[in-house]
Amino acid sequence: MEHWDVIVVGAGAAGLVAATRAAERGRRTLLLEKNRKCGAKILMSGGTRCNLTHATDAAGIAAAFGRRQGAFLRSALAAFDPDAVVEMFHAAGVATKVEPGGKVFPASDSAVEVQRALLEMLRTSGAQLRRETPVTGIRADGGYWIVSTTGDDATAAAVIVTVGGQSYPGCGTTGDGYGWAKALGHKIIPPRPALAPLASSARWVAELRGVTVPDVQIELRPGDETAPVAATKRQRAERTRRGSLLLTHFGLSGPAAMNASGVLTATPHAGAWQAICDFLPAISEEALAAELAAAARNSGRRQVLTWIAERLPRRLATELLAQAQIPPDRAFAELARRERTELVAAVKRTCIPISGSLGFKKAEVTAGGVDLAEVDSRTMQSKLAPGLFFAGEILDVDGPIGGYNFQAAFSTGRLAGESA
Ligand SMILES: Cc1cc2nc3c(=O)[nH]c(=O)nc-3n(C[C@H](O)[C@H](O)[C@H](O)COP(=O)(O)OP(=O)(O)OC[C@H]3O[C@@H](n4cnc5c(N)ncnc54)[C@H](O)[C@@H]3O)c2cc1C
């Protein structure tokens, strides 16, 4: 049986960085990958442009993961923050750019360039890569780890598990690591889809497929909850997300909907949901009502549709007028007070029925995974099984859209490679 200092299982974002770092430290390192291609998710990420991190500091990344996950990530981010990630890519010849909102992409808009750079760093480090080698099990034996594959087994002093979660299973991420971790005594927080599009049967949504609204606030509510809601202000804030929204043939997509999906999958509510959409969140309901009243006074001959279409995509503006039961050719002078109230409600509180998320098949990340309480956040080593390390999405870590998830994978992967 071949013996290695470190075996890394899974050549995605976390595994590539972990194996590179371990080999750079002089550890004889083997990286095993199930697929022929490494970093399949890197290639498809960010619409094949790869949003590789976010233009903020370690504290900014930690904050985006919330208090519990952010605290766990603190050491990993301190050692390898967004600037360090950007520097790593610059050193590998990948120029980067920051887009409005803070997303960092390769200047070439090419995810292939990011994947190639990671593979080149791996090659230079001296780590050995074995593709098309699915790992089937990991067990401890006499102070060593035995890693079983569909081919030959191998042993190592340390194993880093970076097999990801179980979203987009077509990429090879079929949740293989959970069973291994569980068998080694680890608690697995039940995996669930996060950053998934939302399904809706609303006909008008499907008819408006392709329409993007740049700034929408979505609050997800259980379907049987009526307004005024029993929920507290804090509860409502926790289930509200803001960002751009894409209407599709199946329902809602884009950052606002996908970031909100974790709320839905985290809540044990078997029934339907409703997405309360505020299509102009930058302006309060009172201010919008006042603006409409002023327009009625000062621009009576102007069409209401034209006014709304200056603020929202025209096809959506037409739909919102229809929902408020206002004819499309209505001028402000003819707009009744009741119609104004209905229009404000349509813009600020349109309710879209949601039957669920599109599930693991279309979720960009998996929430849940290896319980953080059982992993040493200063090294990524298991607290239960010395020599066993976890990094990346297999951990109970999931962040919002914006490059946060790759940053977490790079930082935890690097720390595991530094420690194994
Ligand atoms: C469509 C899509 C777009 C995304 N866009 C972005 C984005 O722009 N920015 C961002 O920050 N995040 C994005 N993400 C999320 C990001 O891709 C993941 O969070 C990240 O890839 C997690 O890295 P990882 O290394 O932990 O796991 P993965 O990248 O999933 O890698 C796991 C690797 O392990 C391999 N593997 C699995 N089982 C075995 C086994 N038994 N034996 C051997 N190998 C195995 C897999 O084949 C895979 O190569 C996106 C995800 C998707 C699906």
Image (cartoon, rainbow, N blue to C red):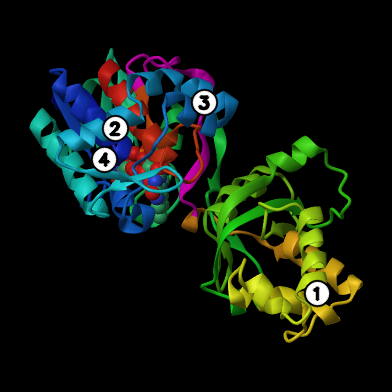
Label 1 is placed on what type of residue? Answer: Ala
- Residue indicated by mark 3: 70
In magenta, the rendered stretch is 363-388
Q: Specify which label sits upstream in the sequence, 4 or 2.
A: 4
Report, in whole angstroms, how far the alpha carbon at label 1 lies from the one at label 3.
Answer: 43 Å
Which residue is under mark 4?
11
Name the amino acid, label 3. Gly
**Does the stretch in magenta take in 366?**
yes
How far apart, in angstroms, are the residues tagged by discs 4 and 3? Answer: 24 Å
* Left or right of 354 on screen, residue 367: left
Determine the quadrant in which ligand 1 lies.
Answer: top left
Give the mark nearer the N terminus: 2 vs 1.
2
User: Could you say whether the residue bearing mark 3 is in a helix, strand or loop?
Assistant: helix
Rendered position, 249 above or below 181: below
How far apart, in angstroms, are the residues tagged by discs 2 and 1? 49 Å
Residue corresponding to mark 1: 324
Disc 1 to disc 3: CB gap under 8 Å: no
Q: Nearer the viewer, mark 4 or mark 3?
A: 3
Q: Amino acid at mark 4?
A: Ala
Between disc 1 and disc 4, whose residue precedes?
4
Residue 65 belongs to the span the image colors magenta: no
* Label 4 element class: loop
The image position of residue 335, as x and y in percent, is 84, 78
50 up-or-down from 294: above or below:
above
Give the residue type at disc 2. Val
Give the spatial CA distance, label 4 vs label 2: 17 Å
* Disc ID at residue 85: 2
Secondary structure at badge 1 equals loop
